[in-house]
C-alpha cells in the first residue's frame, strides 16, 4: 500500500528536494500548508532551514505546532529534518535570544562549540542498537549536514510506561544529536534528501514505520 506523506510547507526547508526524495522511495507526496491534509496524511515531514526563531514563526503561521502535537497525541508519524527537528525541542538560543519550540522533546538547541562553523559536509554518525532509521546501514555511512546549531545534551530520560528514545550522535567540535527515534516522533539533524543512497535508505526505513 502506497503511503500518503505530507511535506509541511510553512515557508522553510528544501520542500522539492524532500518531495523528490520521498517519491523516490515509493511515497505519494503532497507539499502543502493545509491543516486537514497534513492531519489526514499517513506521515508528516517537517523540513526546516535557517534560524530557529524564523522557523517557529512560520510554523505557527500555518498552525504547524498544533498539527505536530495532535498527530503525536494520536500516535501518528512525524519526521523532522534539520531545523525541522530542532524546533521539536523545548527551546532554541541564537545570538542571545531564546525562542520557544514545540516542546515535544526537552532540550535546548544551541550553537556548536567548534573551530569551523557551519558544520557543512559529510559526516558519520553513531546509531544505537535497535535503530529503525539506520537499519541496514553501515557504521561508516556518511550523511550530509549543514548547520551551526544543535542539541548537545539529551535530556529526556526513560520513565514509567515508556522506553528510552533511541538517540544517534555525531561530532563536530562537540557531540550533538544527529537523529532521534521516539515512537511516532523521529528527527534527523542531517539532510536525508541530500544524502544520496544513504538518505534514500533512511527515508525508506522511516516510510516502513508509517
Image (cartoon, rainbow, N blue to C red):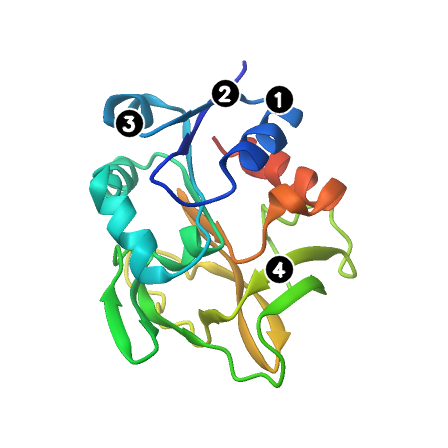
Q: Nearer the viewer, mark 2 or mark 4?
A: 4
Q: Tell me if residue 127 comes above or below residue 195 in the rendering.
A: below
Disc 1 marks which residue? Answer: 26
Q: Position of residue 85 (x, y in %)?
A: 43, 54
Q: Position of residue 187 (x, y in %)?
A: 47, 51
Q: Residue at x 63, y 61 (%)?
A: 127
Tag 4 secondary structure: strand
Disc 3 marks which residue? Answer: 39
Q: Residue furthest top?
A: 1
Q: Which mark is residue 145?
A: 4
What crowding class fits label 2: few (fewer than 14 Cα within 10 Å), some (14-19), or many (20 or more)? some
Q: Residue at x 25, y 22 (%)?
A: 36
State the CA–CA distance, disc 4 to disc 3: 29 Å
State the CA–CA distance, disc 2 to disc 1: 8 Å
| Number of on-image labels | 4
Q: Tell me if residue 68 comes above or below residue 83 in the rendering.
A: above
State the CA–CA distance, disc 4 to disc 1: 24 Å
- Mark 4 or mark 3: name the one nearer the start of the chain: 3
Question: In this view of the protein, which residue sits in the foreground, 116 or 30?
Answer: 116
State the CA–CA distance, disc 3 to disc 1: 20 Å
Q: Position of residue 129 (x, y in %)?
A: 62, 59
Disc 2 marks which residue? Answer: 3
- Mark 2 or mark 4: name the one nearer the start of the chain: 2
- Determine contact: label 2, label 1, CB under 8 Å: yes
Tag 3 secondary structure: helix
Amino acid at each position: 500500500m502506497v503511503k500518503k506523506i505530507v511535506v509541511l510547507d510553512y515557508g522553510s526547508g528544501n520542500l522539492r528536494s524532500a518531495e523528490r526524495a520521498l517519491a523516490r522511495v515509493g511515497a505519494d507526496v503532497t507539499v502543502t500548508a493545509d491543516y486537514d491534509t497534513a492531519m489526514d496524511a499517513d506521515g508528516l515531514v517537517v523540513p526546516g532551514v535557517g534560524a530557529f526563531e524564523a522557523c517557529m514563526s512560520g510554523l505557527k503561521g500555518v498552525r504547524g505546532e498544533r498539527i505536530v502535537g495532535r498527530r503525536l497525541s494520536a500516535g501518528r508519524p512525524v519526521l523532522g529534518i534539520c531545523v525541522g527537528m530542532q524546533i521539536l525541542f523545548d527551546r532554541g538560543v541564537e545570538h542571545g535570544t531564546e525562542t520557544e519550540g514545540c516542546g515535544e522533546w526537552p532540550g535546548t538547541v544551541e550553537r556548536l562549540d567548534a573551530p569551523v562553523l557551519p558544520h557543512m559536509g559529510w559526516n558519520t554518525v553513531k546509531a544505537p542498537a535497535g535503530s529503525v532509521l539506520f537499519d541496514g546501514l553501515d557504521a561508516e555511512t556518511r550523511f550530509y549536514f549543514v548547520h551551526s546549531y544543535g542539541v548537545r545534551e539529551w535530556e529526556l530520560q526513560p520513565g514509567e510506561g515508556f522506553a528510552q528514545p533511541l538517540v544517534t550522535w555525531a561530532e563536530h567540535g562537540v557531540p550533538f544529536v544527529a537523529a532521534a527515534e521516539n515512537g511516532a516522533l523521529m528527527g534527523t539533524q542531517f539532510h536525508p534528501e541530500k544524502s544520496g543512497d544513504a538518505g534514500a535508505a533512511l527515508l525508506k526505513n522511516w516510510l516502513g514505520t508509517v
